[in-house]
Image: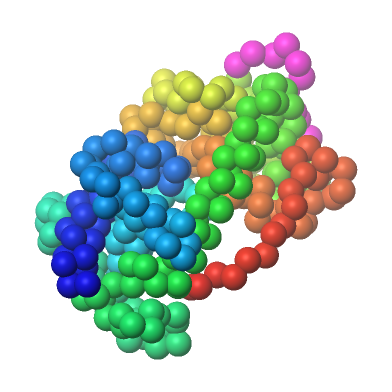
Amino acid sequence: MTEDLSRSRSLGVQLAYEAMKIIVEHGGQAPAREIIAETGKRVPLDDWATSTYDKSGAIRWQVLLRFHTLGFTKAGYLVKKKGVWYITPEGEEALKLGAVGMFNSGTEAYRRWRDLNPKAPVDSQQDTAEEAPYSSSASDQAATLEEMQSSADEGIKQRLFELNAYEFQDLVAALLRAMGYFTPFIAPKGKDGGVDVVAYQDPLGAVSPRIKVQIKHRQKNPATVQEIRELVGLLGKAGDIGIFVSSGGFTPDARAQSRNSHVHVELIDLGRFIGLWQDFYPKMADEEKEYLRLQPVYVFDPGL
């Protein structure tokens, strides 16, 4: 058992560190499914690593990766939300500690979290961060839950990419209305370039800020820094806010441009869009839900 734990620790540290580096390479965020797949290609995996746990059928190295990044979320290095992993500025700084240093820091944060959450599920046989519950029912359930969430998001993504650009534009407008905004202007078919949706906080548009939305619906081409600059150029009125929705994501330079812009430009990639749609879906009118119908499924969340 001690030998297995040692192997698990060694592999988990490598996997988690490599995953964090991959997130940085993707501009600070990426879908969990893509991160896991790429990590599996970069880190050597033997037959033991690719074997499955008897009870859950979960693949060992994937459970180790998900569990070893748990400490990073408790340390504030990583955020996992709606099937997307985000590295924080603290996480980027922690990468400089190296694989082992970053893991030790995350482990210490995990211990503190466990002390503050004594009722959280733990493994009946292994109750310390030193002997992490790699194959416990709680950690298996956490990994399975995250995989289910990723699979659900993948299904939604496939449906979204079946929509044409104008249908996706209507979807974005429907989301804004569910969030409480009014959308008096939606670009008609045939219009190319410029603002696709204008949104206000009140029916008359008398309350600032005015929101201008640019939408790019393409699967493989991320929005570029030049496209972000073009939206910035359209924010003429003082206090205008820009929202750029790109189903193909954003290049790292585009994200940097948004962060450093003198005006507020909010970026929404497909993962974030799906998360917002799920969050505001209960508030939508029935006819708005027809754009992208969802079926909620309730499963046990082990709280890890």
Task: Tell me residue 17's x, y (percent).
Answer: 22, 51
Quarter of the view holding residue 22: top left
Tell me the residue at 21%/68% (across/down).
Answer: 5
Residue 105 visible within the image? no
| Residue found 12% across the figure and 53% down from its top | 98
Q: Residue at x 47, y 21 (%)?
A: 221
Q: Eyeballing the image, is 253 above or below 13? A: above
- The magenta stretch spans which residues? 184-193
The answer to which of 75 and 133 lies nearer the viewer is 133
Quadrant, the C terminus: bottom left
**Front position in the image: 53 or 191:** 53
Where residue 40 appears, as percent x and y from the top left, is 31, 41
Depth order, front residue of 135/101:
135
The extreme right residue here reads: 287
Magenta span: predominant SS is loop
Q: Is residue 144 toward the left or the right of residue 39 in the image?
A: right
Q: How many marks?
A: 0
Above or below residue 11? Residue 123 is below
Question: Would you say residue 35 sits in the magenta stretch?
Answer: no
Q: Is residue 189 magenta?
A: yes
Report the side of 217 relative to 262 (left or right): right
